[in-house]
Amino acid sequence: MEEKLKIPPNVAIVMDGNGRWATRRGLPRTDGHLAGEKAVGEIVPAAVDFGIQALTLYAFSTENWKRPLEEVRFIMNFNRELLRKRTDEFNKLNVKIRFLGRKGRIPPSLRRQMEESSETTKGNSGLKLNIAFNYGGRAELVDAMREIGREVARGKINPERINEKTINRHLYAPDIVDYDLFIRTAGEMRISNFLLWEIAYTELYITDVLWPDFDRDCLLQAIKEYGRRTRKFGDILPTEKS
Ligand code: IPE
Ligand code: IPE
Ligand code: MG
């Protein structure tokens, strides 16, 4: 019998393994980023179909600037072109595009395209597509602390009343405070500074599939696995309670 799918409302994906995908084929690493575009083009409509509410894709971390300048430049141009090519298509799917991360260091031409993609899709009510770009979980918390500090200095917040909700309100996407499913491709058993606060009780799913090979069926497998998990949030099950 076909099992009924339990759809995780908020999903985050670490799109990892582009470099390895290329190296295994004797190609330059940057060809792996190019190949990853197809997966983005397949996973976004699949997320819409499955009825996922928010999809957050890790595209560039605050630590990825350490890579050779040529690769960083390639990634900047590649992301600009990807957005230019895909915005209308995603717009037609009622997808709302947003960017999480620090804007400062991003080249102006990419930043303009990011603004355009957000502007074009800002009225959409379907899938929230968050692209984490120049994103770091620690940087996000530092930015939140700075803003809270400013509000304390202005007398808007009483430090004694700071609680988890105060932090939630100052995140890059205050409407998505908790993720249900965290997917990482390419097998690494680590978080790599993605969504630290927001994944406190998220279900983790790590697959060896490299990002350029990740397709709709891989997403379906992750959703099925999520459906088999028992989430307890620190509690015990109702059936265990006397
Ligand atoms: C993920 O793939 C893309 C970015 C981090 C920008 P990688 O480039 O990290 O691929 P691997 O981990 O070297 O295979
Ligand atoms: C995480 O992958 C960042 C993105 C996928 C954008 P990395 O390849 O940068 O992570 P590490 O260096 O293996 O931890
Ligand atoms: Mg990697």
Image (spheres, rainbow, N blue to C red):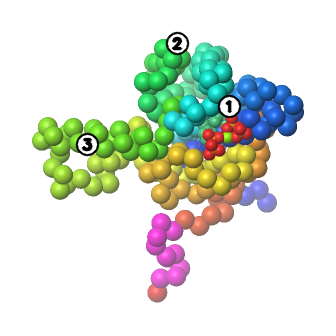
Secondary structure state at the residue bearing disc 2? helix
Q: Is 217 situated left or right of 50 in this image? A: right
Report whether residue 33 is seen: yes
Question: Where, by quadrant of the figure, is residue 28 drawn?
Answer: top right
Disc 2 marks which amino acid? Ser
Q: Mark 2 — residue?
A: 109
Report whether residue 89 is seen: no
Q: How far apart are the alpha carbons under marks 3 and 1?
A: 35 Å
Q: Quadrant of ligand 3?
A: top right
> Which one is nearer the viewer's eye here, 4 or 196?
196
Q: Nearer the viewer, mark 3 or mark 1?
A: 3
Residue in the picture at 48% in, 50% down: 196
**Upstream in sequence: badge 1 or badge 2:** 1
Task: Identify the magenta region.
Answer: 232-241
Residue in the picture at 48% in, 29% down: 98
Q: Mark 3 — residue?
A: 148
Q: Is residue 239 magenta?
A: yes
Place of residue 14 in the rendered image (x, y in percent of width and height, measured from the top left): 62, 42
Q: Is residue 32 magenta?
A: no
Q: Is residue 179 above or below residue 87?
A: below
Place of residue 114 in the rendered image (x, y in percent of width and height, measured from the top left): 51, 20
Q: Is mark 3 within 8 Å of ligand 2?
A: no
Place of residue 55 in the rendered image (x, y in percent of width and height, measured from the top left): 56, 39
Secondary structure state at the residue bearing disc 3? helix
**Upstream in sequence: badge 3 or badge 2:** 2
Q: Is 164 situated left or right of 96 in this image? A: left
Q: Is residue 83 above or below residue 144?
A: above
Q: How far apart are the alpha carbons under marks 1 and 2?
A: 21 Å
Q: Nearer the viewer, mark 1 or mark 2?
A: 2
